[in-house]
Image: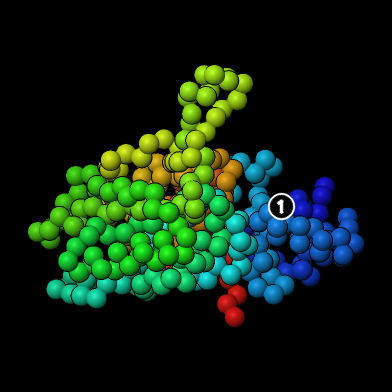
Amino acid sequence: MSVTKILAEEFAGKQFTVREAYEVAGAVAKRPSIRARIYEGLKNNTFLRLAKGVYATTYTTEDGADGDCVLINGDGRDLSFLKDDSVDAIITDHPYALPGALKGGNRDFASYELFQYTEKDFEEKYRVLKPGAFLVEFLPEESAENFEYLTRVKQMAMKVGFFYYSKVPWQKGSFVANTGRKSKNAEDVMFFTKGKARNLRPDAKKDKADPSEKHYMSGANGMLPAAFNFEPPGKKERIHQAEKPLGLIESIVKYVSLPGEWLLDQFAGSGVLGAACAALGRRCLMIEKDDVAVGNIVERLQMGRVQLETA
Ligand SMILES: C[S@@+](CC[C@H](N)C(=O)[O-])C[C@H]1O[C@@H](n2cnc3c(N)ncnc32)[C@H](O)[C@@H]1O
């Protein structure tokens, strides 16, 4: 069995040190060769370097198409451990802090850390995505309190080089927030691309002319809908306050990626992106800071976690 496979099987979904790699693969290869395999794996994300001498494997199945998943307990705004041009899509929902938004005795306020994006966040997203890849960001529906921030978010994304691809509202089914305002009953799903969108849109005309292969044009896999319509998970079934419906995330995953590709959620919450990727044969990297949320994801997806060593 190859060194890469031995390490992948031994450390699936866990972190390991070079010393541990030597111990596990020492019977089949010498130390320089084990190190060389790790470095090789870093190039294609089979291994991730989390800190000096600390690695994680992302490879857990024979054919790599079963939806491999890595969960990192760490800071999703720090993507320094990911290589340039290495991620096929980002689908994420950051916990936005809006001045005044939690006023007025709102009991459903977020129990986790809130923040506003800066340009550096977008620079990092841009750096790790492959050219043409999609960045999908959930944003609240525009309101008097947030419209300036929402505009800033889009401007920051475009300033670092993203193209504005589309905005699709998520209409929350028949859910009605009892606030007297409509803004709680919808969110916006922003689609950006790193430069010109990659080719995911089936080209039926070319397929007809040349049936020997599938042809694709620039753009998402299918025309995006005017709105996504999915009921949010009920209070009893959800494991996270801001949990998105699985059907919605699966739908987005299909529009922006292909089986076997790597998707990233920097703020994993309930781990719904991991669940969607597992169901659809994608690979998934999730980052979540909150220990309770991480524990819930581990339970939901029956997976291990990687504790990110922060400097
Ligand atoms: C809006 S929720 C995400 C919900 C998720 N999309 C879902 O459907 O389940 C945001 C999550 O980001 C986490 N978070 C906040 N700051 C973070 C950070 N710097 N790094 C990683 N996670 C963070 C919060 O703990 C929370 O679980």
Q: Is residue 279 at all visible to an observer of this figure?
A: no
Residue 123 in percent (x, y) is at 49, 67
Which residue, as the protein is rendered here, is positioned at the far bottom? 311
> Mark 1 near ligand 1 (CB under 8 Å)?
no
- Judging depth in this view, the residue of 156 and 21 nearest the camera is 156
Secondary structure at badge 1 equals helix
Q: Residue at x 90, y 62 (%)?
A: 30
Which image quarter is the C terminus in?
bottom right
Q: Is residue 78 left or right of residue 15?
A: left
- Judging depth in this view, the residue of 216 and 106 nearest the camera is 216
How is the protein colored in the picture?
rainbow
Q: Residue at x 67, y 66 (%)?
A: 49
Q: Is residue 21 left or right of residue 70?
A: right
Q: Residues within 10 Å of mark 1 (few under 14, many from 20)?
A: some
Q: Quadrant of residue 13?
A: bottom right
Name the residue type under label 1.
Glu
Q: Residue at x 41, y 72 (%)?
A: 118
Q: Is residue 116 at all visible to an observer of this figure?
A: yes
Residue 38 in percent (x, y) is at 76, 61
Residue 174 in percent (x, y) is at 19, 44
Q: Residue at x 12, y 58 (%)?
A: 181
Residue 247 in percent (x, y) is at 37, 42
Q: What residue would you read off at disc 1?
A: 9
Identify whether 1 is placed above or below 214: below
